[in-house]
Amino acid sequence: MFMGEYQHSLDAKGRLIIPAKFREELGEGAVLTRGLDNCLFLFPSEEWSALETKLKTLPLTKGGARQFVRFLFSGATECELDKQGRINLPLNLREFATIEKDAVVIGVSNRVEIWSKEKWDSYVECAEEAFEDIAENIVDLGI
């Protein structure tokens, strides 16, 4: 399980250090893609395969389902950690997430999210203000 928040900077080649605590769980390979809320999702290969299996069951006739699958898969790229524990963030994904230099890497259960520091700070500020309301609403989901 991934959890925690870490701040890192991209190097001149667009590589980002993945926190040591996440490296073992990511294993040999992972899939990086566009995520929701303008962040990037990094899935261990097994989690990506499980997600892919679920997405294949979505009805092709539903426009929203087609858009969601296109969004995830068109931005997806397989990546490996180098010897220093870094992954390369392709330019198209850096542009999508507006990551220029400073990034925040967070663990979110079965995936890692990579945010621009500015977007993450803004997200946290908004989420903190709404946290109690969100907590009240998720009670209806059985949590």
Image (spheres, rainbow, N blue to C red):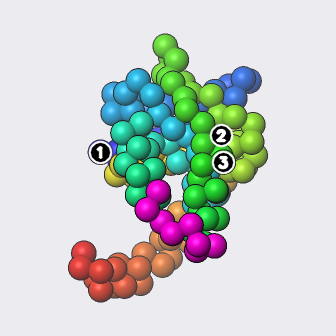
Q: Residue at x 51, y 69 (%)?
A: 59
Residue 9 seen from this side: no
The label nearer to you, 1 versus 2, is: 1
Q: Is residue 19 left or right of residue 99?
A: left
Tell me the kind of residue under disc 1. Met
Figure quadrant of the N terminus: top left
Q: Tell me, for residue 74, which label it has, or none.
A: 3
The residue to which callout 2 is attached is: 102
Pick the front one: 87 or 11: 87
Label 3 to label 2: alpha-carbon separation: 25 Å
Please, is residue 116 above or below residue 143 in the view? above
Pick the front one: 60 or 135: 60
The label nearer to you, 3 versus 2, is: 3
Does label 3 or label 2 sit earlier along the sequence? 3
* Main secondary structure of the magenta stretch: loop
Q: Is residue 70 left or right of residue 48?
A: right
Residue 122, position in %: x, y? 62, 63
Residue 103, position in %: x, y? 61, 42
Query: Regarding mark 1 in the picture, which secondary structure is present there?
Result: loop
Please, is residue 53 above or below residue 81 in the view? below
The label nearer to you, 3 versus 1, is: 3
Q: Residue at x 59, y 53 (%)?
A: 72
Label 3 to label 1: alpha-carbon separation: 26 Å
Q: Tell me, for residue 1, which label it has, or none.
A: 1
